[in-house]
Amino acid sequence: MAPARVPGRIVPPAGVPGWAAALAGLVSAAVALGIAQLVAGVIDGATFPVIAVGESLIDLSPGPLKEWAIATFGTNDKAVLVGGVFVVLAVAAGALGVLAVRRLRPAVAAFGAIGVVGLVAVLSRPGAQAVDVLPTVVGIGAGVWTLSWLTRRMLRAVPYESPLPADPESETETGTGTGTGTDTGTGTGTGDVERPVVMRAGAELRAFDRRALLTGVAGGVVVAGAGALAGQMLAGRKEVAAARSTIKLPAPRTPAKPLPAGVDLRIRGLSPFVTPNADFYRVDTALIVPQVDPASWTLKIHGLVDRPIEISYADLVRMPLTEADVTLTCVSNEVGGPYVGNARWLGVRMADVLRGAGLRSGADMLLSTSADGFTCGTPMDVVMDGRDALFAIAMNGEALSPDHGFPVRQVVPGLYGYVSATKWVTDIKVTRFDQDIAYWTPRGWAERGPIKTQSRIDVPQSGASLPPGRTKIAGVAWAQHRGVDAVEVRVGDGDWRLATLAETPGPDTWRQWSIDWDLPRGEQTIEVRATDATGHTQTAALAPPAPDGATGYHTILVKVG
Ligand SMILES: Nc1nc2c(c(=O)[nH]1)N[C@H]1C(S)=C(S)[C@@H](COP(=O)(O)O)O[C@H]1N2
Ligand SMILES: [Mo]
């Protein structure tokens, strides 16, 4: 049943409990603020009114009061002030809710008046612009709408029932027949006789509908929370983008070796040796990319150390920087899959930072945690053995993008990403594998994840139709920190032939390969396999990615002729 329109002057609220009216007011204010925050996030830099009011109060308060506040609350003085504004707003909103069930129009007007206070504050801020009013205006609009909606919603029109004694013969029928079908026994259905009802001239009978109020309130809370969260996220994204754009990357103390001329065979369709940042695969558990401001970022190192340390971004980039070409690989990459990419990383050797804390004997695991709570367990010996295990700040000459871990991530040659490449890293606990457990381990993935020797055919593409004659077959192979020594290709049941290998700067990157082949007509399968520098040839046995990386030969099918 649709609620009847509530007239400007509505039913006396005899049946509406005070808490319900106040709750409606509070939630309306929350919606107003949530929507205001959303708009402030969407529109570049538009002012969120509560902050503007707080700043105006600081400007208006006399010197001694300011000094008292600073002396009493210290660096929390601003937070206390903004908190105070919220408390005042909450009290006012509750009162408005109580007013609204008596007289909606004055309540709406008072809501608007609070908005005007916010607008005055917003516009009095230095450098205020016309768009700055939008968060307040749209927020107040949403709040007013919510207040009248909730007020109407909790005062449901009810069917008129005769106060005269019911006909004894139809009594049972009346008792059950007029109850609403949605009543679940909580006493809020419109047919409930215990509920106080309010009658008005014009034969409009209204009653407090608790369930309608509470479901409305729940909706309001969701809208307010989602608006506030999305708004904060958008604002945070802009702030971090601005911080990132001002970063000047220091020159490395240890630059990467210049890439040999022949690292890139420049074959159409073959993955370039350096994966452009925009094409680099992304794998993480983050639903929302964490926005971490380098100004507030710190890295804590604790656990089995002599002196726990906490370093800032400025501290980190003052340390000697190392540049290294390293290929990242995801354990969840299927044979032939796309989750592998190569970049030039700039960062501080993890070993240098860790030594500063003094590693204690007995530790064998570095449990790193990201800003969003992901954890990763890295074998300590691998990080400390002299390889280019980095706290990286840049990728291919650019500060990391938020997607790839800005401001600081780990990069450890030779280990799959899930046990090594923590993005947005903020904390390292020096610990033991038998004492701590990282995110993916209880989810069916191996505790340790050395990268398996693998190879992939990039050209031709599987399923391609090719003209008969000489065909270039090419791809990439990787065996990080061991290095690729050979790649072999086979067509059909023929013999394995050695492919030509491109140059590499070292064992930590993938290696391009190619081979020319006179393919016979018909449907042909092409297979590839790599041998690493330890002499190990990748196994033909098929294994899925879980628990410790897929195996098998990448095999494609082409049609020739
Ligand atoms: N914080 C965080 N870091 C993370 C992950 C994650 O889920 N959260 N995933 C890891 C995995 S599984 C991989 S393969 C690499 C991928 O790094 P990329 O997204 O920069 O390519 O990041 C690693 N670092
Ligand atoms: Mo991964």
Image (tube, rainbow, N blue to C red):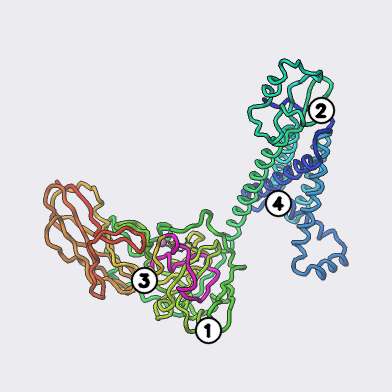
- Residue 230 coordinates in the image, percent (x, y): 60, 50
Is residue 420 inside the magenta stretch?
yes
Q: Earlier in the sequence, mark 1 or mark 4?
A: 4
Q: Is residue 52 left or right of residue 248?
A: right
Residue carrying label 4: 48
Asked if marks 1 and 4 touch (Cβ < 8 Å), the reply is no
Q: Earlier in the sequence, mark 3 or mark 2?
A: 2
Some atom of ligand 1 lies within 8 Å of the CB belonging to the residue at label 4: no
Residue carrying label 1: 358
The kind of residue tagged 2 is Val
Give the residues in magenta.
414-443
Q: Earlier in the sequence, mark 1 or mark 2?
A: 2
Kindly give the residue lying farthest to the front in the view shown: 169
Residue carrying label 3: 414
Find numbered disc 2 in the image and state the secondary structure of the residue it sits on: strand
Kindly indicate the quadrant of the structure image that contains residue 5. Answer: top right
Between 129 and 555, the one lying in front of the other is: 555
Nearest-to-viewer mark from 1 and 2:
2
Nearest-to-viewer mark from 3 and 4:
3
Nearest-to-viewer mark from 1 and 3:
1
Find numbered disc 3 in the image and state the secondary structure of the residue it sits on: loop
The kind of residue tagged 3 is Gly
The kind of residue tagged 1 is Gly
